[in-house]
Amino acid sequence: MLLVEDREGANARRSEIGATMGGLCVRRFAWTHACTEIDACCRPDTRAAIVDVGASGARLVEWLEAHRPGVPVLALLSPDLAPELVKRAAAMADDFAMAPLRARELELRMARLLELPGSAPKVIARRLSRTLGMRNMVGENPAFQRLVASLPRVAASDATVLITGETGTGKELYARAIHHLGPRHDRSFVAVDCGAFPDHLMESELFGHAAGAFTDARGEHRGLARMAEGGVLFLDEVDGLSLAAQGKLLRFLQERTFKPLGDERARQADVRVIAATNRDLPALVKEHRFRADLYFRFSVLPVHIMPLRERRSDIPVLARHFVEEHAPRAGRALSFTDAALERLAAHDFPGNVRELHNLVQRAVVMVDGDRIDVPDLVALGLAAPAEAVVAATSSATFRLAKARAVETFERDFVARLLGKHGGNITRASREARTDRRAFGRLVKKHGLQRAAKEAPGAPGLG
């Protein structure tokens, strides 16, 4: 086993790694910033590598990102490592640990990495999963970077996670990142929209049912908990559960057992549970609309994802990221003008990252030319600043000024709700407290059909 040590900080951890580790002979290699070929130090029988990344390890991480050894890599990370380096090192390695660690724990981690002789496909799969986990964690805001830096630690645990944040902030993306970075990455990730099931179907959908358990139950139904066996069960919108459903879920979380409807046998569940909500659960507990014991079961590892307006500096970063992701798929070379990026950064984005993502996707389809400018953003549904509306109406008659202001308000209002609800007209009209068909007519009036999508089974635009 090869031990690659960053010179600074390595001495403090030398005593933890002996001459042998789990039956493997340990050979030390000191990183000098001048090394050009780590593989030259690998003998044919080298089975694994530990990379000791200290506070000055940026160059080491950069080199390893470009020249990964052909063996499993365990990154040993210094506690004072910068958040960005933690993110990069965790993505680069096949496993990671925060120093200091006891020799026994290092041995266990190496044994898990090696698993079986000839495990190269597993190493490749693990690396791919880590890359997928970090791919969507885009942002330079310091608070967001701290959130990303904590992700590897959260993923390495098997404790229940409660992710909170407004609609569209990326709660499911964070949950999937936990799955990709964690030890269950090669098993299922099953997402459950708790607000989508009627109360009488929730138990059956989650825990399954036996044949004949109720009318129309002609065969056995496995249930989502069994589909997630060995993997992650993601419970989205848990605030939508009734008190009765909460009680059944509490039993499941406490004992990790469940009974399918109509079946007398209790089944064990080997799943990690991640829950998410955009509501204030402590407030719901005070209102007796959410069980306190279930809330505390969920919030073992609480994670809060901030709204986009609280990290405005990331809006241009995300906009460029999305256009670089979608434009090539459409066979286009597209970019934003500086003025357009400034305009985006000034917008509040009530639909958060999802609203920005939808806006960029519309721009890729609708904008002519190779540059997205401010007029394009306004035409695509981004609200014009209040001062622009005043300037446009200052020289008009009262009636015309009023008509323009109403039209601007309507388009902005409809576009915001569509962005917030991912284009779902039914949900958007429900929040607007207006008839769905009337809302659909507003969508058509302002040319926002491309931003809208139908809920399953919903009638068309009126």
Image (cartoon, rainbow, N blue to C red):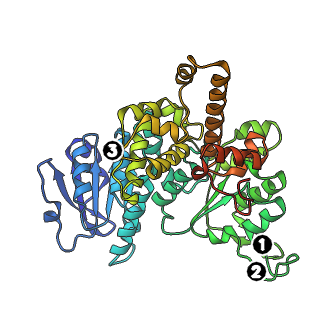
Q: Quadrant of residue 384?
A: top right
- Verify CB contact (< 8 Å) between mark 3 and mark 2: no
Image disc number at residue 260: 1
Q: Residue 47: x, y in percent? A: 27, 70
Image disc number at residue 145: none
Mark-to-mark CA distance, 1 and 3: 46 Å
Mark-to-mark CA distance, 3 and 2: 49 Å
Report helix, strand or loop for mark 1. Answer: loop
- Verify CB contact (< 8 Å) between mark 2 and mark 1: yes
6 over 219 or under it: above or below: above
Q: Residue at x 27, y 64 (%)?
A: 20
Q: Residue 425: x, y in percent? A: 69, 50
The mark lying in front, picked from 3 and 2, is 2
Nearest the eye: 23 or 136: 136
Q: Residue at x 29, y 58 (%)?
A: 50
Pointer 3 local density, CA inside 10 Å: few below 14, some 14–19, many at least 20: many
Image disc number at residue 220: 2
Q: Residue 79: x, y in percent? A: 37, 41
115 over 247 or under it: above or below: below
